[in-house]
Image: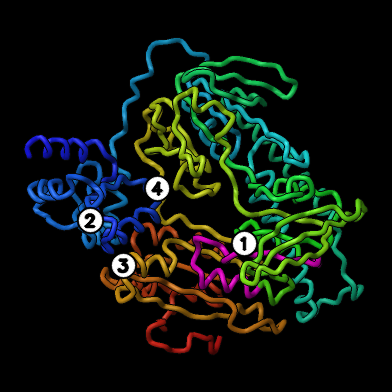
C-alpha cells in the first residue's frame, strides 16, 4: 500500500488536471463534460477499468478522506468530487487554479548560438501577434509565412485566414448583404430611390474588398519591420528540434536555427473524399476573390462558415441552397442555431436537410459553368441531383500540422484530429510552442490566437506571468440575423449541472428600427442560462438579432467577473436599444410564461 500511495502522490503532483473516475458514473460524466467545455485536456484514471482500481480507491480515501468518484486534482491540489468541482467552476476558482499552473522550465535552452531566439512558423493573426510582441521585447525573431495554393490556385498575402479569406472579407460581404435589405427599409423612412430596380455588382464589391485586404497585407509587413522582426515568405519544415529548412516560392532553400519555436500554422478547409469535390468545388479560400458572380450556388455544410456564406449570397440575390447533413452549428446552443436557420429559410436560403453529396460533375464549361451535384437522403436513401453554377464546401477545417516535420522535432500530435496537445501553449518538446487553430481543444478564433500569442511572448521573456484564459470566450456567427454567445449552451449547462439546477430567463424583442419598415415580430431573442445553486450565476448568455456581435462583446467582462442574474437586473438599460433586453429578463422557461414582446 505504501508503494501504491507513493505512485499516486507522484501522479497527482506531476499532472496538470487529474480525475480519478469510473466509466459508468453519471457524476464523473458531468465533470468530464465540464472540462471538455472548458477546453481542458484532463487526465482520467478509470478505476473500474484498472486491475488495481479498488486498491487505488482505498489509497485515495487515505489521502483525500473521500471514498467516492470523481476525485479531482488540479496542479497537485485536491478539489474534491462532482459538487465541489462544479461549485469551484461557478465561482471562478477552478479557472484561476488551472491558469495558476507554474511555468515549466525549458531544459533544452543552453548557451548555444542560434540564428534566432525564436522562429514563428505562420504569419496569421496569432503568429503576427507573437512575433511583434517578441520583437518589441528585444528578441531576435524570424516570422515565416507561406500560403500553399488552394486546389483552384488561390493564394494571398501576409496575415493568415482571418484577414485574407476569413473574418474580414466575410464581415464585409455580410455588411454588403445587409445594406441591400437596408435599401428596402429606407423607402419606408422616406428615401426615394431613382429607380425601383436596384442591382448589386459582385465584381465591384470584390475589387473594393481585395484592395482593402491588400492594404492590410502591406501594413503587417511594415509592422514586422518596425518591431525588428525578420519576415520570410517561405515554407518552414523541421529538420531536427532546433533546425528548420525554409523554401521560398522560387524553390530556394535556406537553413535556420532557433532556441525556441512557435507553431502558428492555422488550418485550411476540409475536402471530403467525394468524386469531383477538389476538381469542381470551391471553398472559403476561393469565394472572397471570385472575379465573377457565383450565380446559382450550393453551400455544403452547416458550420458557421457555411451559414454565413449562404446568408450573404442569398442577401445579394443569388439562388442559394444549403445542404445540411445533421444539425446547424454543432457545438453551439441548438435552440439559437435553429432560430438562425429558420430566419435564413424565411429570407431566401433553401435548405436540403438530412442529405449528403455523393458526386459532383461538370455539365457545361460556361460561362457560367454548370455543375451537377448528386446527393443522397440519409433517411430514405433516395438519390437526387440538381445543377448549380458554384458549389462551396464548408464542412470544417483541418489543422496545418502535416508536412512541417513535427515528427523530426519530436512534437506529438493528436492522431484523430491532427492537432497539437499543449499545456499553456507548450508542446511536449519544452522549447516548441503552439498557438491558434492548431491547438487541441481550444477555440478556433482570431482574438484567441492573438491573445495567446501576445501573452506567450511576454512569458517567454519574463515580463509577464499571465496565461491565456480560454474560458467564457465570446463569439458571434454572422448569419443574416447574427447570433452571439458567451459561455455554455443551455443543453450543456443542463448536462453538467442537472436540469433541476438550471434556470433559463428568456425574452423576444423587436429592434425599434424594424417597426417602421414592418419587419417580423418575435424573431430576435435573448436568454440567460443561470445556475440556481450558485446565486443564479450566469453560465451562458445568448442573443440572436442585429449587431449581436456588438452586444455580446460588451457583456464578456461581466461574465469573466462572475455576473449573476441579480447583477443584470441591477443594471440600467439604454433605451431604446436591443441590448437593454438583458436588463429586463423576467420570464423563465420553467414558468411557461409567454416570452414574446409587448410594448416598446
Against 82, residue 126 (above or below) is above
Residue 188: image quadrant is bottom right
Mark number, residue 419: none
Task: Give the CA distance from mark 1 to mark 4.
Answer: 28 Å
Q: Nearer the viewer, mark 3 or mark 1?
A: 1
Circle nearer the N terminus (2, 3): 2
Badge 4 is on which residue? 469
- Indicate the secondary structure of the residue bearing disc 4: loop
Looking at the image, residue 422 lies above or below residue 40: above
Q: Disc 3 to disc 4, how far (Cα)?
A: 22 Å
Q: Position of residue 389 (x, y in %)?
A: 84, 58
Q: Which residue is mark 2?
A: 70
The secondary element bearing badge 2 is classed as loop
Q: Are marks 1 and 4 in contact (CB under 8 Å)?
A: no
Q: Badge 1: how crowded within 10 Å, few (<14), some, or many (20+)? A: many
Q: From the viewer's perspective, is 44 left or right of 270?
A: left
Q: Secondary structure at mark 1?
A: loop
Kindly report the distance in space between the C-alpha atoms of the residues bearing marks 2 and 4.
25 Å
Q: Residues within 10 Å of mark 3 (few under 14, many from 20)?
A: many
Residue for point 12% across, 56% down: 67
Residue 19: tell me if it is visible: no
Question: Which residue is tagged 1?
Answer: 302
Nearer to the camera, 563 or 483: 483
Q: Which residue is mark 3?
A: 497
Kindly indicate the quadrant of the structure image that contains residue 350.
bottom right
Task: Tell me which corner region of the image, top left, top right, bottom left or bottom right, holds residue 429.
Answer: top left
Q: Position of residue 476 (x, y in %)?
A: 56, 60
Q: Residue at x 63, y 51 (%)?
A: 167
> Where residue 205 sits: x, y (%)?
81, 54
Quadrant into which the N terminus falls: top left
Distance between mark 3 and mark 1 Cα atoms = 28 Å
The part of the chain drawn in magenta is 316-343
Amino acid at each position: 500500500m505504501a508503494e501504491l500511495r507513493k505512485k499516486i502522490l507522484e501522479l497527482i503532483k506531476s499532472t496538470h488536471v487529474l480525475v480519478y473516475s469510473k466509466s459508468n458514473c453519471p457524476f464523473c460524466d458531468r465533470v468530464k463534460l465540464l472540462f471538455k467545455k472548458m477546453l481542458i485536456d484532463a487526465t482520467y484514471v478509470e478505476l473500474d477499468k484498472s486491475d488495481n482500481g479498488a486498491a487505488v480507491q482505498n489509497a485515495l480515501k487515505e489521502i483525500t478522506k473521500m471514498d467516492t468518484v470523481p476525485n479531482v486534482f488540479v496542479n497537485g491540489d485536491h478539489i474534491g468530487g462532482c459538487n465541489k468541482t462544479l461549485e469551484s467552476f461557478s465561482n471562478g476558482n477552478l479557472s484561476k487554479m488551472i491558469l495558476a499552473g507554474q511555468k515549466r522550465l525549458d531544459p533544452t535552452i543552453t548557451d548555444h548560438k542560434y540564428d534566432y531566439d525564436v522562429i514563428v512558423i505562420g504569419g496569421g493573426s496569432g503568429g503576427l501577434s507573437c512575433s511583434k510582441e517578441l520583437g518589441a521585447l528585444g528578441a531576435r525573431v524570424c516570422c515565416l509565412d507561406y500560403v500553399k495554393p488552394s486546389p483552384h490556385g488561390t493564394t494571398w498575402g501576409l496575415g493568415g485566414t482571418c484577414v485574407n479569406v476569413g473574418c474580414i472579407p466575410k464581415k464585409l460581404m455580410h455588411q454588403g448583404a445587409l445594406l441591400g435589405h437596408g435599401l428596402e427599409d429606407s423607402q419606408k423612412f422616406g428615401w426615394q430611390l431613382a429607380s425601383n430596380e436596384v442591382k448589386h455588382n459582385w465584381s465591384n464589391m470584390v475589387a473594393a474588398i481585395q484592395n482593402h485586404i491588400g492594404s492590410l497585407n502591406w501594413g503587417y509587413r511594415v509592422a514586422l519591420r518596425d518591431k525588428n522582426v525578420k519576415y520570410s515568405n517561405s515554407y518552414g519544415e523541421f529538420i531536427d528540434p532546433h533546425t528548420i529548412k525554409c523554401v521560398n516560392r522560387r524553390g530556394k532553400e535556406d537553413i535556420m536555427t532557433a532556441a525556441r519555436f512557435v507553431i502558428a500554422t492555422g488550418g485550411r478547409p476540409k475536402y471530403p473524399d467525394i468524386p469531383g469535390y477538389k476538381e469542381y468545388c470551391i471553398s472559403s479560400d476561393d469565394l472572397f476573390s471570385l472575379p465573377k458572380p457565383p450565380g446559382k450556388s450550393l453551400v455544403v455544410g452547416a458550420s458557421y462558415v457555411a451559414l454565413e456564406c449562404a446568408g450573404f449570397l442569398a442577401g445579394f440575390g443569388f439562388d442559394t441552397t444549403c445542404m445540411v447533413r445533421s444539425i446547424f452549428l454543432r457545438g453551439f446552443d441548438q435552440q439559437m442555431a435553429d432560430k438562425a436557420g429558420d430566419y435564413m429559410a424565411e429570407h431566401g436560403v433553401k435548405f436540403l436537410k438530412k442529405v449528403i453529396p455523393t458526386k459532383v460533375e461538370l455539365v457545361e464549361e460556361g460561362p457560367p459553368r454548370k455543375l451537377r451535384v448528386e446527393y443522397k437522403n440519409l433517411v430514405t436513401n433516395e438519390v437526387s441531383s440538381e445543377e448549380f453554377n458554384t458549389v462551396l464546401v464548408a464542412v470544417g477545417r483541418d489543422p496545418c500540422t502535416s508536412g512541417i516535420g513535427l515528427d523530426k522535432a519530436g512534437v506529438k500530435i493528436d492522431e484523430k484530429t491532427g492537432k497539437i496537445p499543449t499545456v499553456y501553449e507548450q508542446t511536449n518538446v519544452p522549447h516548441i510552442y503552439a498557438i491558434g487553430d492548431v491547438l487541441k481543444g481550444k477555440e478556433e478564433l482570431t482574438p484567441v490566437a492573438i491573445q495567446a500569442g501576445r501573452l506567450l511572448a511576454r512569458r517567454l521573456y519574463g515580463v509577464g506571468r499571465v496565461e491565456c484564459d480560454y474560458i467564457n470566450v465570446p463569439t458571434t456567427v454572422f448569419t443574416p440575423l447574427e447570433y452571439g454567445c458567451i459561455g455554455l449552451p443551455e443543453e450543456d449547462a443542463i448536462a453538467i449541472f442537472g436540469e433541476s439546477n438550471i434556470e433559463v430567463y428568456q425574452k423576444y424583442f423587436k429592434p425599434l428600427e424594424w417597426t417602421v419598415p414592418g419587419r417580423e415580430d418575435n424573431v430576435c431573442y435573448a436568454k440567460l442560462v443561470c445556475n440556481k445553486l450558485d446565486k443564479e450565476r450566469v453560465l451562458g448568455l445568448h442573443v440572436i438579432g442585429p449587431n449581436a456581435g456588438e452586444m455580446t462583446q460588451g457583456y464578456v467582462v461581466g461574465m469573466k467577473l462572475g455576473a449573476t442574474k441579480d447583477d443584470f437586473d441591477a443594471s440600467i438599460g439604454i433605451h431604446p436599444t436591443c441590448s437593454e433586453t438583458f436588463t429586463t429578463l423576467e420570464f423563465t422557461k420553467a414558468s411557461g410564461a409567454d416570452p414574446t414582446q409587448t410594448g416598446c
